[in-house]
Image (cartoon, rainbow, N blue to C red):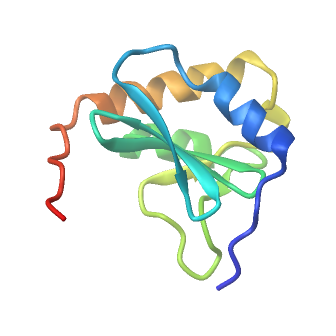
Amino acid sequence: MQIPKPSEADKTFFRSIVPDDPRVEVKPMFGNLGAFVNGNMFMGLFGSDIGVKLSPADAATLLGMDGAGPFGPAERPMGGYVSLPASFKGTPNTAGWVARAIEHVGAMPAKEATKR
């Protein structure tokens, strides 16, 4: 499986849409980036694609829009995540879907730190 690498512009844009929330942390993941709330990923970057973890109803709504689709490797997309349409980049639509993702994932129990 080939993991695409994001450009510096992709990483900069990703960081620019991460909400300013003390619970949120951005971490590198396999050469890409992930945004986490309470230890759970709510948004990720995979190459130039941005994916958000949504409730089933919100995921179905987003998947019904042109340009939205599965998030992650084509061979094994990440369950519960939907790629935002590229046409959303730099529009208020992006912030709205990111807000839905952080609300959905923020309501989940905090992930316990694993012992190494």
Query: In the rendered image, is residue 61 in sight?
Result: yes
- What residue appears at the point 78 percent right and 31 percent down from the top-left corner? 88
Q: Nearer the viewer, residue 98 or 55?
A: 98
Q: Nearer the viewer, residue 78 or 38?
A: 38
Q: Nearer the viewer, residue 41 or 76?
A: 41
- What residue appears at the point 49 percent right and 52 percent down from the top-left corner? 81
Residue sitting at the far front: 116
- What residue appears at the point 58 percent right and 20 percent down from the top-left corner? 96
Residue 90 lies in what quarter of the image? top right
Q: Is residue 22 above or below residue 110?
A: above
Q: Is residue 26 left or right of residue 102?
A: right
Q: Quadrant of the C terminus?
A: bottom left
Residue 55 lies in what quarter of the image? top left
Q: Position of residue 112 (x, y in %)?
A: 14, 47
Q: Position of residue 110 (x, y in %)?
A: 18, 37
- What residue appears at the point 32 percent right and 43 percent down from the top-left corner? 40
Q: Quadrant of the N terminus?
A: bottom right
Q: Is residue 1 above or below residue 58?
A: below
Q: Position of residue 31 (x, y in %)?
A: 64, 61
Q: Is residue 103 left or right of residue 110?
A: right
Q: Position of residue 76 (x, y in %)?
A: 53, 77
Query: In the rendered image, is residue 94 in sight?
Result: no
Q: Is residue 25 left or right of residue 114?
A: right
